Image (tube, helix red, strand yellow):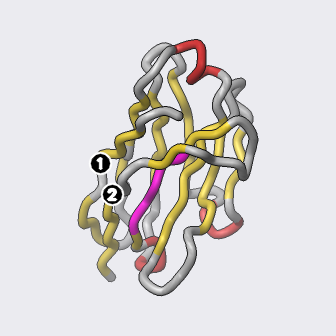
Amino acid sequence: QVLLAESGGGLVQAGGSLSLSCAASGSIFSFRWNVMGWYRQVPGNERQLVADITGGGSTNYADSVKGRFTISRDNGKKTVFPQMNNLKPEDTGVYYCAAGPIRGKYDSWGQGTQVTVSS
């Protein structure tokens, strides 16, 4: 397991942007091989995948965020960079970073960061 710490959440108006980050502890070697996931949770609902990125940089996005959100990573800095553009009120939620050996199999989670989009 690795320790993950998200940052960059906050309050933004609809149409605005937020730049998040997720920093991982542990060795650079192990981080390079981890798939990094990015999830959103709203009260009463399960966490839902927003995007993920493999160690090689292959990305995958939920339909609701395609064309608006991007995810990138810097393996040397052990950090993932979710970028959210053209935000909508329905993007509001707590965003979590996750790490694991394959897509959908995450064994490490961050503490989450709140994103609130006002209309």
User: With 55 as the anchor, is 108 left or right in this view?
Assistant: left
Q: Quadrant of residue 25?
A: top left
User: With 13 as the anchor, is 52 left or right in this view?
Assistant: right
Spatial CA distance of label 2 from label 1 is: 7 Å
* Mark 2 or mark 1, earlier in chain: 1
Q: Which residues are magenta?
A: 94-98
Which residue position holds label 2?
A: 113
Please give the label number shown on residue 34. none
- SS under mark 2: strand
Residue 60 counted in the magenta span: no
User: What residue is shown at x 39% (from left), y 66% (from top)?
Assistant: 94
Name the residue furthest front: 1
Labels 2, 1: front one: 2
User: With 24 as the anchor, is 72 left or right in this view?
Assistant: right
**What amino acid does circle 2 point to?**
Thr
Q: Nearer the viewer, residue 65 or 114?
A: 114
Image coordinates for residue 21, horizontal then vertical, percent: 39, 40
Can you say which quadrant of the picture contains the C terminus?
Answer: bottom left
Image coordinates for residue 89, horizontal then vertical, percent: 41, 78
Which residue position holds label 1?
A: 8
Image coordinates for residue 117, horizontal then vertical, percent: 34, 73
Q: Main secondary structure of the magenta part?
A: strand
Question: Badges 2 and 1: C-beta atoms under 8 Å apart?
Answer: yes
User: What residue is shown at x 59% (from left), y 13% (from top)?
Assistant: 29
Q: Nearer the viewer, residue 56 or 84?
A: 56
- SS under mark 1: loop
**What amino acid does circle 1 point to?**
Gly
User: What residue is shown at x 53% (from left), y 82% (from top)?
Assistant: 45
User: What residue is shown at x 36% (from left), y 45% (from top)?
Assistant: 6
Crowd around label 1: few <14 · some 14–19 · many ≥20 (10 Å): some
Q: Is residue 4 above or below residue 88?
A: above
Name the residue furthest bottom: 44
